[in-house]
């Protein structure tokens, strides 16, 4: 009898000098950042809105939620599938790769409101973030 390993796939991306990842099941697409329209009185992590093929997409800066102070405005946007018909995207600095993991690769002992766990990759930690905590 063979052992079945639960294989997950995550997208690894960069914000400033740190590596993060998210489950690809949440991702609709990855696009280039276009001109944003600022929204008055929006939450601090909302950069504005962008037109994405006729859909108004709210663009969020995950650096604000994750406590990063870097000012670099990324040029890529990860667009998420949401259950409430909203279109939300994260502005990021760089898309690195899609990585296959099994449950043993994820250390969930550091789980918090915005972090699912950490993954060790090439002697470096990759922080697995929860989209639900940032897409608020």
Image (spheres, helix red, strand yellow):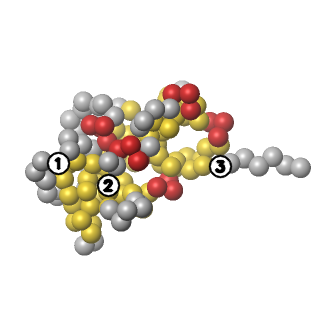
- The disc at residue 115 is none
Q: Residue at x 56, y 32 (%)?
A: 108
Residue located beneath label 3 in the image: 7
* Earlier-in-chain disc, 3 versus 1: 3
Q: CA distance from mark 3 to mark 1?
A: 38 Å
Residues at marks 2 and 3, CA–CA distance in whole angstroms: 25 Å
Quarter of the view holding residue 29: bottom left
* Tag 1 residue: 42
For the point 50% across and 38% down, the residue is 116
Residue 79: x and y, percent?
36, 58
Local crowd size for mark 2, using a 10 Å CA cut-off: few (<14), some (14–19), many (≥20): many
**Residue situated in front as seen by the camera: 36 or 84:** 84
Label 2–label 1 contact, CB within 8 A: no
| Placement of 19 over or under 38, stated as above or below | above
Residue 68 in view of the camera: yes
**Marking on residue 89:** 2
Q: Residue at x 35, y 32 (%)?
A: 17
Q: Residue at x 56, y 50 (%)?
A: 9
Judged from the image, the secondary structure of the residue bearing numbered disc 2 is strand
Q: Earlier in the sequence, mark 2 or mark 1?
A: 1
Upstream in the sequence, badge 2 or badge 3?
3
Vertical order, 136 against 36 (above or below): above
């Amino acid at each position: 009898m063979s052992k079945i390993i639960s294989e997950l796939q995550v997208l690894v991306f960069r914000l400033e000098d740190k590596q993060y990842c998210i489950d690809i099941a949440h991702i609709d697409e990855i696009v280039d950042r276009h001109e944003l329209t600022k929204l008055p009185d929006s939450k601090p992590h909302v950069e504005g809105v962008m037109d994405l093929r006729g859909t108004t997409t709210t663009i969020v800066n995950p650096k604000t939620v994750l406590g990063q102070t870097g000012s670099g405005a990324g040029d890529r946007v990860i667009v998420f599938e949401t259950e409430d018909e909203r279109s939300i995207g994260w502005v990021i600095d760089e898309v690195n790769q899609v990585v296959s993991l099994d449950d043993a690769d994820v250390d969930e002992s550091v789980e918090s409101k915005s972090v699912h766990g950490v993954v060790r990759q090439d002697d470096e930690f990759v922080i697995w973030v929860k989209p639900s905590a940032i897409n608020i």
